[in-house]
Image (tube, rainbow, N blue to C red):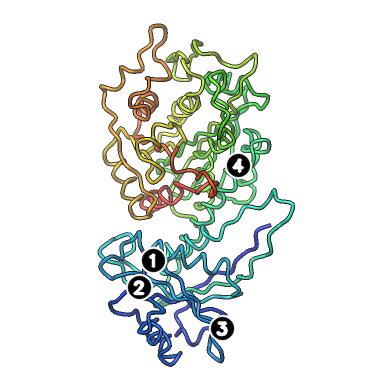
Amino acid sequence: MRVAMNFSLSSKAITATKADCLVIGLPEKGEWPESTKAADDALGGLIKQLEKAGDLTGKNASVNTLPLVDQPWQRVVVIGTGKDADRTATAYRKSLIAMTGALKDGPSKSALISLTDTAVQGEAAVSSEEARLNLIGRILEDQLYTFTEFKSDKPAARKLKKVVVQASGAGKSLKDAFNLGLATGRGMNYTKDLGNTPPNICHPVWLAEQAKAMAKDYDSIQTEVLDEKQMEKLGMNTILAVGKGSKQPPRLIVMEYRGGKAKDKPYVLVGKGITFDTGGISLKPGEGMDEMKYDMGGSASVFGTMKVLAETKPKINVVAVIAAAENMPDGGASRPGDIVKTLSGMTVEILNTDAEGRLVLCDALTYVKKFDPAAVVDMATLTGACIIALGNHATGLLSNNDELANELLAAGERTGDRAWRLPLWDEYQSQLDSNFADMANIGGRPAGTITAACFLSRFAKDYRWAHLDIAGTAWNSGKAKGATGRPVPLLVDYLMTHAG
């Protein structure tokens, strides 16, 4: 059970705000922020003395905890913020992550954070106090996350219960920015919860139940779920083909958030929801297959984004469509060589059953035309080739519209949830040629991420469309194994720029 945190803003002097712990920033040389000067004055010059002695360096993301006696606070956590010239948005984020780690594992029950007056050089992402408050809120929620639902021995409850963030005032814009950051962090955490849930629990019907629960929790969300019979009647044969080998039936999940005017065209989010991917008959290697529970990361990020919208209530219309299935091998599973007719009427030769994400997405992309969308963004843990190309730092972005692509890239830059655009040239389309159907579902090893998007582009010709390949960014492997909550920050930022 996750303990609820109490977050708030304060424009009072730091000495007038009670807290067990004060958090301040210390640059590596350069001008001190006013809050750090005020803390040093209150402590009789202690910070300056320790800096001169070399005990405090200000190196970026360094953490020093100073116990105090007979002071306004029981301790001061000094976060190094690096040199002024090197304090980029990325460096600032690293210092905030280090700060949250110290608070998460520390003894304080309450903390006062005074880092919004730390100057960040030349980047719109954190150039304003509103932007810094948004980032602080998001990182606090994100970095305080834990997932212990399936552990018998629960860890000791975290002592930290209350966090106050220092701000220059109490205006609406500052509060809204901070609250949006907190909501974004909670949306990321919901995405992580869904991704981290084991596949024996998280299957397509269970995902549909979560969507129905969201509609009950939030009046602004309406949910519709299509079962296999309804999809068969419509002709969504590729989603059905992927789910044929599983005892868990596929589902098409539709969630609508209507915060804008009735006449406003909705922005549509489409998520790949493969709740477990064995590869089907084209079976994957056994090593690391447990991580294929994260193959529903696209749908999880759609859920997280819808939660943010429901909490913050922006004036925008958004429709979420999730194509959910489990890709398993049995006697009824799709085979390499099968030909399936899609909802669009085009036929696909399935050469590899492990290229199943594009099969569930193509029917969903055809289905969303009914909403007359302003734009469609799909997200999917689609190709290992994207990890080879971009590693785990950037999401792959491909689009049929330059304006849409640039808006998404800019949202990624502002949030640090970055994407990189790859080409979607016609020259790549021929790799999908089939001797027996309108197209094949794979285009060979060369340019695997691009040909996967080329396949999807054939079903998205009637609207502005972008594809986010999050195979490298949706989860971490190794000791830090777990869902990341990406690309919720990018999606939220993009949608908020279009809110009325």
Disc 4 and disc 1 in contact, CB within 8 angstroms? no
Q: Whole-percent x and y of residue 12?
A: 46, 83
Kind of residue at badge 1? Arg
Q: Could you give the CA–CA distance between mark 3 and mark 1, rounded to whole angstroms?
A: 26 Å
**Image quadrant assignment for residue 110:** bottom right
Name the front one of labels 4 and 1.
1
Disc 2 and disc 4 in contact, CB within 8 angstroms? no
Mark 3: which secondary structure? loop
**Image quadrant assignment for residue 239:** top right
Pointer 3 residue: 74
Disc 2 and disc 1 in contact, CB within 8 angstroms? yes
Task: Tell me the number on the disc at residue 132.
Answer: 1
Pointer 4 residue: 211
**Image quadrant assignment for residue 116:** bottom left
Kind of residue at badge 2? Thr
Kind of residue at badge 3? Gln
Mark 4: which secondary structure? helix
